[in-house]
Amino acid sequence: MGRKPIKVLVAKIGLDGHDRGAKVIARALKDAGMEVVYTGIRQTPEQVVLAAIEEDVDVIGVSILSGAHVHHVRKLVELLRQEGAIDIPVVVGGTIPIPDVDTLKQMGVKEVFLPGTSLKYIVDTVRRLYEERNAIGGYN
């Protein structure tokens, strides 16, 4: 019996209705053998956390183009902490201003993918985060 595939939740948080990039990432992850749960557009941080827990995902990927990334990701990370699920690594992609990258990482985001990031790098990063999480029994 083989190992179960890495399970990734891909979410669009906030009023951002543009999901082409999220769908491209979801397809790349699927093509790499991962299971992808795509929540669709206009999700709240609460909906994303609930879906991540219910689906027992290994990694959460958030795509944001609306400019409200700091607000929404702060709420998402707070909710993960409240639910005892802070060990699920979170990655963020989209049009993120360079000065906000450090802010997001200080909140607990494991990686920020800016426009032009290669699909290979994204897939490799998700794999690495999965392996790190399982090697240490979860992030703290």
Image (cartoon, grey):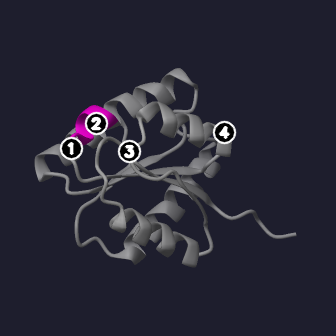
Nearer to us in this view, 53 or 90: 53
Q: In which quadrant of the rendered image does the N terminus lie?
A: bottom right
The residue tagged 2 is 106
Amino acid type of the residue tagged 1 in the rendering: Asp
**Secondary structure beneath disc 1?**
helix
The residue tagged 3 is 42
Magenta-highlighted stretch: main secondary structure?
A: helix
Q: Are marks 2 and 3 in contact (CB under 8 Å)?
A: no
**Secondary structure beneath disc 4?**
helix
Q: Residues within 10 Å of mark 4 (few under 14, many from 20)?
A: few
Q: Are marks 4 and 3 in contact (CB under 8 Å)?
A: no
Q: CA distance from mark 4 to mark 2?
A: 26 Å
Q: Residues within 10 Å of mark 1 (few under 14, many from 20)?
A: few
Eyeballing the image, is 36 above or below 11?
below
The residue tagged 1 is 102
Q: Nearer the viewer, mark 4 or mark 1?
A: 4
Q: Residues within 10 Å of mark 3 (few under 14, many from 20)?
A: some
Amino acid type of the residue tagged 4 in the rendering: Glu
Q: Is residue 25 left or right of residue 38?
A: left
- Residue stretch in magenta: 68-72
Report the disc number at residue 136.
Answer: none
Q: Nearer the viewer, mark 3 or mark 1?
A: 3
Which percent across, then down, holds residue 133? 57, 48
The residue tagged 4 is 54
Q: Residue, x 38% and y 72% (percent of image)?
A: 121
For residue 82: magenta? Answer: no
Amino acid type of the residue tagged 3 in the rendering: Arg
Q: Earlier in the sequence, mark 3 or mark 1?
A: 3
Q: Is residue 25 left or right of residue 57?
A: left
Q: Earlier in the sequence, mark 2 or mark 3?
A: 3
